Image (cartoon, rainbow, N blue to C red):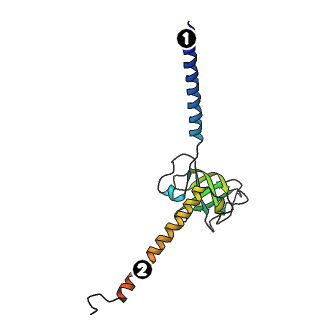
Amino acid sequence: MKTRHKRLILITAGLGTLGLAAWLVLSAFQQNMVFFFTPTQVFSGEAPKGRSFRIGGMVEEGSVKRQADGVTVAFVVTDTAKKIPVTYKGILPDLFKEGKGVVAQGKLGHDGSFAADEVLAKHDENYMPSEAAYAVKKAHEDAAKQKAAGEQAAAAPATQSAVPDAKEVK
């Protein structure tokens, strides 16, 4: 074989090996990638079915219930628009409290509850992932807009009856 052919075979083998290594690394990343969703996104069907993902929001006040075994805990995660019931079997972080930020990793059950494998607690929303803080802020704004629209609609008939029609005023 000529030197030129040997070099061509060596370059081709090197590129093939590099391509195979890149494919293996990318497929490993894809299998271990865990996405973050808010309760509203989970309800809208954006979360993957049968695959692990993270859900984040606030632990609803009065929702934490400890089971008789002392290890299993049930609580509700909310973004103020939607609520997801979560169950977790394990020791909760010290910072886990009602009304505080939480990120739970696990799978969504057939009944709509979330079975968490891991729970991460934050002491306030300033330390939440930026996506979670944005989603909670947006949910608060949307809830305020809906409340204002509801109050405005309720007040509108009373305002209209108190003002005479333009035809009656002369």
Q: Residue at x 36, y 85 (%)?
A: 160
Q: Quadrant of the N terminus?
A: top right
Which x, y percent locates residue 20?
56, 27
Occupied quadrant, residue 32: top right
Q: Is residue 139 above or below residue 15?
A: below
Q: Is residue 84 visible?
A: no
* Tally of marks: 2
Q: Is residue 151 above or below residue 37?
A: below
**In the shown orientation, is residue 150 left or right of residue 4?**
left
Per the image, label 2 sits on a secondary structure element best described as helix
For marks 2 and 1 on the same chain, the one whose residue lies earlier in the sequence: 1
Which mark lies nearer to you, 2 or 1? 1
Any mark on residue 4, and which?
1
Any mark on residue 86, and which?
none
Question: How much space separates mark 2 and mark 1, taking CA atoms?
Answer: 85 Å
Q: Residues within 10 Å of mark 1 (few under 14, many from 20)?
A: few
Question: What residue is shown with label 2?
Answer: 154
**In the shown orientation, is residue 82 left or right of residue 92?**
left
Which x, y percent locates residue 5?
54, 11
Amino acid at the residue labelled 1 = Arg
Is the C-beta separation of discs 2 and 1 under 8 Å?
Answer: no
Occupied quadrant, residue 8: top right
Q: Residue at x 61, y 62 (%)?
A: 58
Q: Residue at x 66, y 65 (%)?
A: 98
